[in-house]
Each structure stands twice: as structure tokens, then as C-alpha cells.
Image (tube, coloured by chain):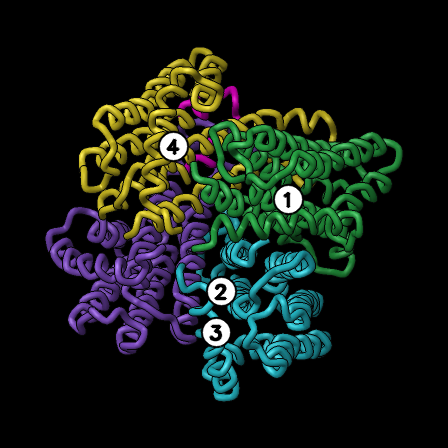
Chain colours: A cyan, B purple, C yellow, D green
Amino acid sequence: MSKNRVESFSDGVFAIVITLLILNVHLDRQQALTLDALRNLAPDVFAFVLSFVIVGVYWVSHHNMLHLIKAVDRRLLWLNLVLLLAVVFVPFPASLLGQHLGNPIAVILYALNLMVVNAVGTALWLYAGSHPDLMTESLSAATVRFVARLHSAPILVYAIGAVLAPWYVPASIVLFVAVPAFFILPNPFLDRRLAVLAGRHQSGESGQRAPS
Amino acid sequence: MSKNRVESFSDGVFAIVITLLILNVHLDRQQALTLDALRNLAPDVFAFVLSFVIVGVYWVSHHNMLHLIKAVDRRLLWLNLVLLLAVVFVPFPASLLGQHLGNPIAVILYALNLMVVNAVGTALWLYAGSHPDLMTESLSAATVRFVARLHSAPILVYAIGAVLAPWYVPASIVLFVAVPAFFILPNPFLDRRLAVLAGRHQSGESGQRAPS
Amino acid sequence: MSKNRVESFSDGVFAIVITLLILNVHLDRQQALTLDALRNLAPDVFAFVLSFVIVGVYWVSHHNMLHLIKAVDRRLLWLNLVLLLAVVFVPFPASLLGQHLGNPIAVILYALNLMVVNAVGTALWLYAGSHPDLMTESLSAATVRFVARLHSAPILVYAIGAVLAPWYVPASIVLFVAVPAFFILPNPFLDRRLAVLAGRHQSGESGQRAPS
Amino acid sequence: MSKNRVESFSDGVFAIVITLLILNVHLDRQQALTLDALRNLAPDVFAFVLSFVIVGVYWVSHHNMLHLIKAVDRRLLWLNLVLLLAVVFVPFPASLLGQHLGNPIAVILYALNLMVVNAVGTALWLYAGSHPDLMTESLSAATVRFVARLHSAPILVYAIGAVLAPWYVPASIVLFVAVPAFFILPNPFLDRRLAVLAGRHQSGESGQRAPS
């Protein structure tokens, strides 16, 4: 299985998941369209935007990881499919979160789903990182560890969110929002480290697919 | 993040959005299939066709913009994801427009969604245009400004449509139809300017991906 | 707009349409699962299979046409989007056909949709065929005419199907099945002509994208 | 029809099918979100995970087969579309399996669908294998037979599952789980044979698409 096919298949799945999320935002045909009806959809819209952004971050992370991986063996292929399985699941807890935003069960299920995605993503990365034949040569052990920490840290944040849910749901929501914000907003800590990685990407890229 | 991946991921999202729109056109299983039942679906079909064409114009614009961009940095990547977020949202107001065509709320929400798409698209373009390292070299400041004006002009038209909606919905609809018509129908003003841009595209393309 | 992007965007839309068709086949959650319930779904399954095969034929035809086209101008781009609009619409009449197989209205609407697809496809082809700068050089006027006839002939068959529907729906269905069968089943007439075209494809391909 | 297009169109269909499966897991809007309500969804989640993994195995198999095929003629193209037709059908019996897990009818329909996929896949492979002009040169008759046996063996397992369903559904489920487990879990028998095939893949790949 060539790395490029795994990458483009995964991209397709990410693109479909991110688009299917909008199906969770809808008004029943019989319902009147009033400002109140729209206001009642606010939690659904919030859950849609949050999930879109979180899946977007996953897509970027997945892409960055695969960029540093040069070959895919059978185990990595299946780890990647398990990762996609967890990503494809997201629209279900996302729909529950939108419809029952105040309900701790929805919040906990959402947190668990995201924890699984991050855990499998970290496992995939560590598996590749411990097989030099699968990785781009220029990658140091320090970079492998840094990326693994970056992917596993949200597991703890989501876990705290899940634990807090029965006491105070808004605290969980703040934590869920904080994770993608950390990855997206200008971030001096991340920028410095990513600049280093990006330098490696760049050179890896020109070396790897110059003729394409 | 290579430009080609951003482009193909975006293309995937556009293709899914444009196809999901048809799910808004349907007859309940219990309903009898009569000519009257079909006639009642006319607004849904209209909203489907209008939204398909508008998203089609967005896809072409997005492609044209990315064609003139040669590299994608982290900010451009996230601006692009925010643009996709706004595009993915379209099926929801499109479904409301089809089911409640005479209702100003549906018309205003639809206009607001399109305004956000055009605003983010313009922001994306201006960000790239102000970073020469991200752009194709041959691009003049005049071209950057022309494209920015082309992308932001519809914001005003949609805003007028939103303002007119509480008074006379058909006027809003005419404005919504006018925007894609301007971009699609033979248009001497646009053709002359696009011919210039196309000349640059062509040379940019052969220079940039000759071996592919 | 490069031809390859138009091609891959169209492929994406075809793939989504062909897959969305299965959503028309479903049992309500409250309904008991019995052999009778499944038997009642037979028309839905038939409409699914028929539509899948017809859209599959459209995909192959679209691919064959674009293979003989070497460049895409603005008009061709929009003709292609109108073609995709008509293809994306198919799941709606397909769902009606499945739910109301005996109803002439469903049959006529289905026929009209397919007639539009074939008409726009023929228009797209004739537009490209009359612009030598858009076509592969080796293409003779005879080939252009043959392909145009091949694409427009089903319009007549579907029209007869629509006309017969109010009198005897099964006759319409036989005609709908006959069209894809003509294109798929071993067909000496078609094979001979396609062999000629295929020869041109082959040489066109090796000449056009040797390095990819 | 070039092999690459068939491959990427098929990949698109697989990606959409695998993602659409999650639509089968949902809670009605009116329903309260309780732990009991979630527990009632356990069969749906199980059917989702099982079907995701089975379609994932099909995707990998399809990719492996097409990797060993070097050209696609008209018959192979249509065999591939029939294969996709059977794969696109999977979400329907998968939804029945989730909603009626104890019902032999759901189990038998699910088994029948999978049997058709494996049967068409084997037919596709045998057709290609008996046409040397369509295959990678290095492929021995023994490899062709081994792959054919690998693809057709599950037909028997699923058939036994279907036969056992009226007596004891859990036995059928165990068999359905066993098939993908055989292909995914570390498997000395399979690993040894796949290593041989992989060696051929590798060399086939570097020879075939070195410049891409």
C-alpha cells in the first residue's frame, strides 16, 4: 500500500466527515421558521462549528504526521483505519452535543470520542517513529517525542472536561474550545517548534516528490 | 502543508457540499405523488439550483485564487478552513430557503451565509496578496486589487438583498440570482479582465507544474 | 481552469451521487423487519440499481468525452457544471421512482431528468467538438458526430418511455433498462466503433500524460 | 479508461460508503438522552464498527488487486462498477443489522450482501488473471490462484453464518467478526504469503510509477 493512496483515502474520509456534520443542523419540515426556532438551533450550530474545527485540526495533524512518514506497512495501514473509524464516529456525539448541550452524558461521550482519536493518533505516530524504515531520515528522536506529546496532551484536557461535566458543563465546553484554539491561534511556543518541523517538511518534500 | 493538498481537500469538500444540496429536495414517504405535490416542491428545487450554482461559482473562484497562490502558510491554511466552514454551512440556509421561500428570516440567513463566504474569501485573498512569498511572481498589485473587488462586491449585493427581504422577498431573490449570473453569463467587462488573468494563469501553470 | 481539475471534481461528484443513491433504500426504525417488509422494498432496490448503473454509464461517458478534450474554457466549464447539476438531481426522481414505481408521474420525471443529462452532455460535446483548440488533434469530424449521436440517442428512448408511462409503465421501465444495457453488454456495433476510439485514446493518453 | 482513474473513482466510493455508515447510528430528536438510550444503540454501534472494518478490508483488498493489474478494459471496468454497486449497498443491510441484531432476516441479508461483494471481487480478479495483457508481468499463476482463494474463502464463511442465523444468531456474528480479524490481526500464514506478494508489489510499483 503506497503512502500516497493512504493519504488521499484519508483526506477523502476527512472531507466527507467535515461536510456531513452540517446534516446535524436542521429544522423539521413542519416547524415554523421564527427567530425563536433559529435561537433554539444555537447549540446545534455551536456543536457543528466546534466539531468542524476539531476535525479540521485532526486533518492538519494527520497530514503533518503522514508528511514525516515515508512508507506504510500493514500495521500502520490498520492503525490509520482505526484512526479514521474514530474520526468517522465524531458526527454522532457531535449531534448529541448539539441537541443536549446541557446534558453531561453528551459531553462525556463527545470527550471520550475525541480522546480515542488522539490516543490512536499518538499510537500511530509512535509506531511509525519506532520504525526508522517507515520515517523520513532527517527526523530526530526529539521531534518524534515532541509530536507524540503534542498529540497526546489533548487526551488529558478532554478527560478533565469529561470529569467536570457532571458538575459544570460550561467548564467542559471551555476546555473543548481551548484545544483547537491552542493549535490554531498564533502561538509563540508552537510556532517556534513548528518552524523547525516545517523546515524539515520543506526539505523532506522537495527531496521526496520533486518530480510531481 | 503543500498547496496541492489544500486544493484537493477543498475540492473534495466543495464536491460533497454541492451534492448534499439535493437531500433538501424530497417528498415524505407517506405523501401521495401528485402533480400538486411536485408543484409544492418548486421552491425547494429553486433553492437547490440557486445554491448549486452559487457554490459552483465559489468553487471556480476558489480554484482561480489558489491558482495564483504558490504556497500555503499556517494562517492561509486556517483562513481556507474557515472559508470551507462557511461553504459547508450553505446547505442549512438553503434548506430553509426552499421550505420557507416567502419568509424574510430564511432570505436574510441565506444572505448572511453568502456574505460570510465572500468576506472570508476576500480576506484569504488579501492575506495572500500582501505576502509576496505566497504568490505567483507575475502578479501585479492591480490584479490583486481587481480580484479582491470581484470577491467583495457580492457582499454588498447580498446585504441589499437581506435589507429588502422584510419589504419584498422577490427583490432579494432577483439579487441572489444576479450575482452568479454576472459571473457565468457572457460578460464583456469580466471577459476582458479575465483574459488578462488567464494569460497569467496559463504561463503560471506551465511554469509551475510542467512535469505533472 | 485546467482540464485535470475539472475531471477530478466531476469524478468526485459522480462518486458521491452514485453512493448517496443507497440512502433511498431504507426501512423506518419503527417498522418490523419481516420478509414482507423487505419485499415491499423491492421497487426501491430496483430504482437504486437502475440509477446506479445509469449514473455509472454517465460517468464512463463523461470520462471518455473529457479524455478526447484537451483544454477547458469558461463556457465548457459551465456546461460541465450544468451537466453535474442534472446528475446531482438524479437521486430525487430515483427516490420517487422507488417509492411510486407504478405512478406515471415518477416515471415521467425520471425520464425528463435523464433526458436533460443526455441533452447537456451532447451540448457539451458539440461545443468542444466545434472548437478545435479544445480538442485532441487526432479527432475527426466523423468521430465527433458519432459520439454526439451516441449521447443524444437515449434522449429519444427516454422520451418514448415518458410518453408510454400513462398507458403502461412496464414498457417505460423496459426502455430505461435497455439504454444502459446497450452501453454495457457486449455489443458488436459499439465495440467496433469504440475500438477505433480506444486506439485514439491510447495514443492521446501516452502523448498527453506520459510523465504522470 | 486508464487504471488510475478507475482506482481513484473506486477509492472515492469506498471513502463515502465507509463514512455514510455513521448515519445509521443516531438518536431521534424527541428522545431523551439517557444511559439507557445509549445502551439501546449498542447494536447500531456494533453494526457500524463491523461494517466499517469489513468495508476497510474490502478497500485494502481492492487496492491490492488493482495494484497487480496494469490495464483496465471495458469488461473489467464494468465488473469493477458491479463490485462498487455491491459495496455501496452495504449501508442498507448494515442499518438493518444494527436495528434488528437478533433477527435472522437481517443477519442473512447482511451475509448475502457480503457474499456478493466477495463473489464479484473474485470474478474481477479471475477475469484480470486470465488476461495476461491486463496483468503485471511478474505475476505467476500460483499468485493469481492464491489471491482468488483468499477472496472467495469468506463466501463460504458468510454462507455458514447465513445458514446458522435462524438457529443461533451469535454464531453468525462470530463468523462475521472472524473474517476481517483473519485479514487484520497478525497472521503468520497470511504474512508469509503477503510478504511474497509485497515484494512483487514493491518492484511492480517502482517499475510502474517511478516518476509520479
Q: Amino acid at mark 4?
A: Ser
Q: Amino acid at mark 1?
A: Ser
Q: CA distance from mark 4 to mark 1?
A: 27 Å
Dot 3, how many residues are within 10 Å of its Cα: few (below 14), some (14-19), or many (20+)? many
Residue hosting label 1: D61
Image position of B172 with respect to C149: above or below: below
The magenta segment is C89-108
Residue hosting label 3: A201
**Same chain assignment for discs 4 and 1:** no
Numbered tag placed on residue A39 in the rendering: 2
Nearest to the eye among marks 1 and 2: give it.
1
Q: Chain of mark 2?
A: A
Tag 2 secondary structure:
helix
In the picture provided, is A126 more to the left or to the right than B135?
right
Tag 4 secondary structure:
helix
Numbered tag placed on residue C61 in the rendering: 4
